[in-house]
Amino acid sequence: MFQKKLFIILLVVSLVGCTKTKDPIESKIDALLSQMTLQEKIGQMNQLTGTGLSKDMLGQIKAGKVGSILNELDLKTTNELQRLAVKESRMGIPLIFARDVIHGFKTIFPIPLGQAATWNTHLVESGARVAAVEATSTGIRWTFAPMIDIARDPRWGRIAESCGEDPYLTSQMGAAMIKGFQGEKLSDPTSMAACAKHFAGYGATESGKDYNTTWIPELLLRDVYLPPFKTAVDAGVASFMCSFNDINGVPSSGNKFLNRQILRKEWNYSGVLVSDWASIEQMIKHGVCADLKDASRKAIQGGVDMDMMSYAYIRHAEELVKSGAVSEKQIDEAVRNILRLKFRLGLFDHPYMKEPAKMPFYSEDALRKAKQTAIESAVLLKNDKDILPLTHDIKSVAVIGPLSDAPADQLGTWCFDAEPSHSITPLKAIQQLCGSKVKVISEMGLTYSRDTNTPGIAKAVRAASKADVILLFVGEEAVLSGEAHCRADICLPGAQPELVAALKNTGKPVVMVVMAGRPLTIGKEVSEADAVLYAFHGGTMAGPALADLIFGNAVPSGKLPVTLPRMVGQVPIYYAHKMTGRPAEKIVMIDNIPVGAGQTSLGNTSYHLDAGDSPLFPFGFGLSYSKFNYTDVKISKKELSDGQTLQVTCNITNTGKYDADEVAQFYVRDLVASLARPVRELKGFQKIHLRTGETKTVTFTLDSDQLAFWNAELVKKAEPGNFQVWISSDSQTGKPATFKYL
Ligand code: NOJ
């Protein structure tokens, strides 16, 4: 009887298996793979940088030795290279053209860190869409973005490219960018394959020095560094890129645990995994491979599908297969992923990009979105006596500072295709906005951010003394952040601190705007200014955006996506820290220690004598010209069981004088757990618009899964006990409500 039942079950299972139709793309890949030589397969795994129509490149393409080309931008060249691949190589497989389109192609949006400060996923998605429309017109169908490395060290130059310190915010921003780049359908000619990078842990680079080693316990990796990548997989990201760093001694380009165990097995990912630039070869310098052949073996075994610029696969993969060091099955898996992407992009059907009658650059819509993003990315840190906006009777302003008229620097890092001649600087925008109504006096004071030549400061002071208000644009040049542009000291560079102090001494109100690629330690300068806007590098339209904010045509709504430290020695400093066994209580600052104090106890709690225990400004912080009141935090139930949800609501009233946007932030804390948990973790946010006097109720739904964390047994689980929740306007304020997870 039992055997008969088993037979029937097996019959049904096998019938279902037979009738399940295979994805047509997979069948096409099977057909191609069955006809490809080993060398042609390896050719697909080879990505080279564009060299135009060089003889060498043409020969390699015809021989089927190239799968993808990066950094080729001329459409005619691109189409010709494509023609060679499609018409003159034996298999006729199209190439994919790739480029780093990070925060815009021609129309440059704020740097990703600035975009994250908008907390506006729709806007961020629309920016990536603009970038895709512009970039695809030159034949680029693959961008190496978004960068979703968690960045908690502002010394690291690449923090500019990141969405900041928080896994949840980064996940949401990353998913929005992926949606924007990839559009509705990857096969649309204006869609680009996105790339989640850098996998993984690159932001944990020791001492904030690029490419440096990282030590990340698996729990931390899974709790903090991986969630944005998992969200990217769920958002359908078409590709991943390895990171340069080693994690606990294993470089990512040969990291089986990351690339095979987590990415492929646990997340079931079927997109392309590309190495970073020469990162396969760099495994030799890391000291884990003897030579390029060894590096090639390690990378293939480590699950890296495509070799960007190491020439490791093209030179050695064939002999590695022939000697049995790697299997042809591993090669087939990699090629399958690459061909799948080419099919999904529609490259087999439409390999060429039609030359548009007019290049779709700097459209009105693109500039409007870039301006709106720059507006929403600026964070108001201080506004004494409501000096901003300058709506009152002002007759003259002095526009000062090295960033006031720096068209290239306001674009920030990673925008190789941008044209600074299209940037509208703050000075130009303010002159335009003020017209003949307000006199604009301008004097840079310092010619660039690192300038230490102080005579200009005296001139700036003279100019300032003739104006009613000083508008001071300080910060960093674009070259001070980005890849391999790290700083050990993150102060305002050059003589800018002297410039701020000299302007403060004029007694005129100082509105300071900081345009930078990272958090800077500007405590002293903030205390000297009357108002401070932290604007990051705001892109092409930074000027008009800032002018609108300063003169009240727009109201600030940006919130910090990263903590601003008081001093570099506090780094790493982030809001989701652990409590410690001796949290800071009574703090004795260094200047208050009596002379001859000897071994006197200063409280024995966790703080720095010279910095205390608080940041300059916390994650999530940002003022408005209006005021918001959070009241009536309510929780739908006092107890939450597994698999259930609960609602947390709160009323937010705009009690100020301006219609404005506010970002309501939703945080959770696990009070007692088997492992010490962060003091708060962001689990949701909503950006809402409130007219003056208006009240809205915001509701956040908490799923019991959101309480889970990776425990010491490496199991992700929520633990029973009490939790606190907040709906607040930043990561430090608000009144918590409590519930129990059963
Ligand atoms: C190196 C960078 O780390 C990576 O982010 C970038 O995409 C590649 N170079 C290609 O330019």
Image (spheres, rainbow, N blue to C red):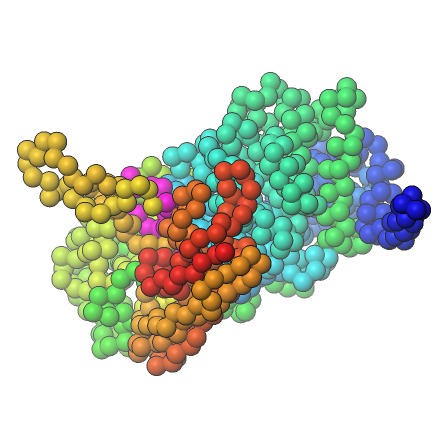
* Residue 576 forms part of the magenta stretch: yes
Q: In the image shown, does 178 or 683 lie closer to the viewer?
A: 683
Name the spot of residue 637 as percent of width and height, x first.
Answer: 47, 67
Q: Is 521 situated left or right of 164 in this image?
A: left
Residue 23 against residue 331 in the figure, above or below? below
Q: Residue furthest bottom?
A: 693
Q: How many marks?
A: 0
Q: Residue at x 62, y 40 (%)?
A: 262
* Residue 600 forms part of the magenta stretch: no
Quick check: can you spot residue 419?
no
Where on the picture, by quarter, is residue 664? bottom left
Residue 654 against residue 92 in the figure, above or below? below
Q: Residue at x 52, y 24 (%)?
A: 286
Q: In the image shown, does 215 or 362 lie closer to the viewer?
A: 215
Q: Residue at x 19, y 62 (%)?
A: 464
Q: Residue at x 89, y 45 (%)?
A: 2
Name the spot of residue 351 as percent of width and height, x first.
Answer: 76, 51
Quick check: can you spot residue 199?
yes
Q: In the image shown, does 326 or 36 lie closer to the viewer?
A: 326
Name the spot of residue 388 as percent of width and height, x first.
Answer: 27, 69
Prevailing SS of the magenta stretch:
loop
Q: Is 20 situated left or right of 399 in this image?
A: right
Where on the picture, by quarter, is residue 305? top right
Range drawn in magenta: 559-578
Name the spot of residue 413 as percent of width and height, x first.
Answer: 45, 48
Residue 321 against residue 144 in the figure, above or below? above
Q: In the image shown, does 140 or 650 lie closer to the viewer?
A: 650
